[in-house]
Image (cartoon, helix red, strand yellow):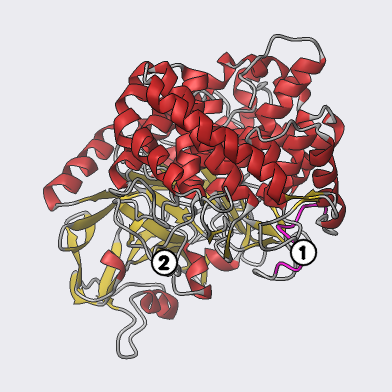
Amino acid sequence: MRPLIFGNGKILICEDERGTVRDVYFPYVGLENHGNSIRVGICDLDSLYCSWLENWNIRQRYKSEFDTEFCNRVHEISESPEEEIARVMASEKGAGNKKTPETFREVTSNIGETVFENSDLGLKVTVWEAVHPSTSIFYRTFEIRNVSNSSRRLRLFSNQNYRILETKIGETAVIDKNVLIHYKRDRYFLHASEPAFDQYAVGTAEWRGLEGTWKDMESDASLSGNPVAHGSVDSTLGWTLPELKPGEATRVHFWVAIGKNYCGVLKVHRRVKNTGSYLFHHNFNFWNSFTERISVLPEYAWMPQLPEEVVKCFYRSLLASVAHMDITGSVIASCDSDIKQFGADLYTYCWPRDAAWVCLALDRARYHHLSAETFEFFSRTITHRGNFLHKYTPAGDFGSTWHPVPMIQIDETGLPLYALYNNWEIARSVWTTGRYYRALVIPAASYLIKAIDRETGLPIPSFDLWEERKGVHTYSACTVYAGLKGACELARSLGDYGNADIWKEAAGKLKETIIEKLYDHKLGRFRRSLEEPDLDSSVFAVWYFGILPPDDPRMVRTMEAIERELLRPSGGIARYLHDSYFGYMNSWIICTLWLSQWHSATGNLDRALELIKWCAAHAHPSGLMPEQVDNGGKPLSVLPLAWSHSAFVLAVLEYLQALDRREGGSCILPEK
């Protein structure tokens, strides 16, 4: 679980549910995870008792309430500790008489706020943290508050234990004046602070019985002062805090500059020293400006009709989807590396299917410049045959697979093509369409034509979207239809009428065959596949991609069967009967939202909103959503999942469009 994530398209930092930094991705979002653990502790210098914050009571969220002085107050680093204590106390005493301006009361930010509390020690530590929007800096501010009835002498510690280039072998950690650097080859991590650390130790960790320099802290609250170590190493920094009287607080500002050489990270460090007080300010302004684009949507007028928790999750879903994007256009499925415990592999790959769903959401929200970056990634990774393989690394290399040759899920070729068509329908950008027409549309559509079996009239067998079964699946066939129909419209928009006619004819025949062979009259609903009659939530694709209208009786019976037979005790929707991935028939966020989208499309808005609210209620308090939810309401598998968040964005906007339509508004988008 990764309840807090911070990224900018070049780096991505992820924290677990105990507030420990676990993942440090660089130079790609999702590729080269140098993380292992960065954790913080405090020692009482009178009793020499030391404690790690990860063992305290914890509350994690993204900061959403701001007063006008926050970005200035949290960054005042030029004062002495005594001056800072006096100023903070004075400002907070006066805060009770000031009303926070409404415009600052509830906003969406990418500034994390974690509160650690230990009633036995009488201490409260608040951590604010963020990544700069364009520079590879991870910035943290620690506020240590004495909530006991006696004065305290304390020392704050931060332990850094990396796996640079994903292994402990061959690292170096070295103190250079007031900075600490971990490096290996061309990967550098510079650590510095204000006030400067007054204790330090670097040494061997996780090697031949040596656990790490943090053992020094636990033994006597002091560090050895060793300045350099190589091999399997870690480091610990310490700050002796000013004496805190009851109710008083002090702050330590800490940052990590990440780069490919010493001079580069040193240059970034000097910028932070000179302008560090503005980093949170830059982050706050950038992401608020980013989310303001939503205000141009016709659906925005209906946003006040949504419950507060849904609005918060909507904006968090938008930011979470973008956080999983690399500047190269790759979109990883999830940054949560805990999943490796269950299969020795990760979700940090770009599945063309997942990336296409993110593109659909971004274009629906009018972030066309971002989806265009993913189309560029698609154009670089499509094979010479015109199809996409199972998954790719963020660098564009072919990823690991459990599929035998030819390693194909055919929906992963149909859906990117449909996503590009969807971009055209909303953005009407001839530039984007023309740029990728020959590189993406022609080869992909030509491949899909060849992939239709002459005997069945349906796509050739391939693995399903759940990556479990090989066959001729309803969902996959619908995405092939959507891709071909989209290719036809794109061809017409550019005057390529010859290909447009070919693709239109193929799409029309496929549509008829899907209805004829994949609808089961005996069952009164659509089948999972040509081979299996089982009920599967993914057959929502029949209406979503335009095979049948959502209110067609055959579609109504199918969706009602899904709601009746796949509804779980927690209130969500399972993938299919007897699903056993991470437990028995867990609810999936995406499946629950597919049902919500159908209810919106058919005008049952109360039920649509109820399902959206269920998803919001089962997000982490930070707003990040898991892949699955068990019957007791507990998140399972990865958290966050980019697909869950892109589906939430789509479901909310489609609900608002349906609400507008019911009220006679003018929110009109092209019909599916």
What x and y, as percent, mark residue 45? 46, 68
In the image, the segment drawn in magenta is 571-579
Q: Is residue 578 magenta?
A: yes
Locate the C terminus by quadrant. top right
Instruction: Measure how far apart labels 1 and 2 are at the Cα level.
Output: 25 Å
Label ID, residue 493? none
Q: Is residue 600 magenta?
A: no
Quick one: which residue is furthest to the bottom in this view? 208
**Secondary-structure class at tag 2:** loop
Of 511 and 344, which appears nearest the observer?
511
Nearer the N terminus, badge 1 or badge 2?
Answer: 2
- Residue sitting at 69 percent across and 14 percent down? 301
What x and y, as percent, mark residue 461? 53, 59
Label ID, residue 401? 2
Determine which residue is flagged by label 1: 577
**Dominant secondary-structure state across the stretch colored magenta:** loop
Describe residue 63's horizontal placement relative to residue 665 as left or right. left
- Residue sitting at 29 percent across and 56 percent down? 397
Locate the N terminus by quadrant. bottom right
**Where 541 sits versus 109, above or below?**
below
- Mark 1 neighbour class, 10 Å CA radius: few under 14, some 14 to 19, many 20 or more: some
Describe residue 597's horizontal placement relative to residue 346 as left or right. right
